[in-house]
Amino acid sequence: MLANYAPILIFLVIAGVMGAVLLLLGFAFGRGQKDPEKLSAYECGFEAFEDTRMRFDVRYYLVAILFIIFDLEIAFLFPWAVSLDAVGRFGLAAMGIFLAILVVGFVYEWKKGALEWD
């Protein structure tokens, strides 16, 4: 039973050793000189326009959450579509209910104006 996990253990050991070696090579051969221009904060190649601790609009987070929700929906749809023959009508009904709940949530967010960028 333990022999089944040997390739995973070997992979983890090799990855750990490789990561440590690459870090050590970077410290050994990298230049440690840091000039003020390299340490300065920049934004897309320009100096920062405003304070970096400014507040973000809550709508940004709402759109991000909506993106994650609908991205997860697609992640659930792919395995369901592949195994549609195996799950049968029960699987079709369950996915219909799942999609209906997500559509209701989407319509609610739309009506509340969460997708508006004023």
Image (tube, grey):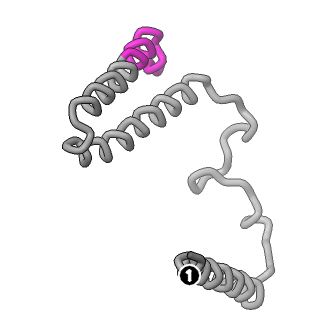
**Front one among 4 and 24:** 4
The reply to whether the magenta stretch includes residue 39 is no
Q: Which residues are magenta?
A: 104-118
Is the residue 45 above or below the residue 116 in the image?
A: below
Give the quadrant of the N terminus: bottom right
- Residue under the point 44% across and 21% down: 115
Residue 101 in the image, given as x and y percentages of width and height = 39, 19
Residue placed farthest to the top in the image?
A: 111
Report the residue marked by disc 1.
3
Tell me which residue sits at (74%, 86%) in the image.
24
74 in relation to 28, above or below: above
- In the picture provided, is 43 more to the left or to the right than 85? right
Residue 12 horizontal side relative to residue 29, left or right: left
Tell me which amino acid carries mark 1. Ala
At x 55%, y 23%, the residue is 59
Residue 50, placed above or below residue 110: below
Question: Is residue 110 covered in magenta?
Answer: yes
Mark 1 Cα shell of 10 Å, populated few (<14), some (14-19), many (≥20): few
Residue 27 in picture, x, y percent from top left:
76, 84
Residue ID at (61%, 79%) = 9
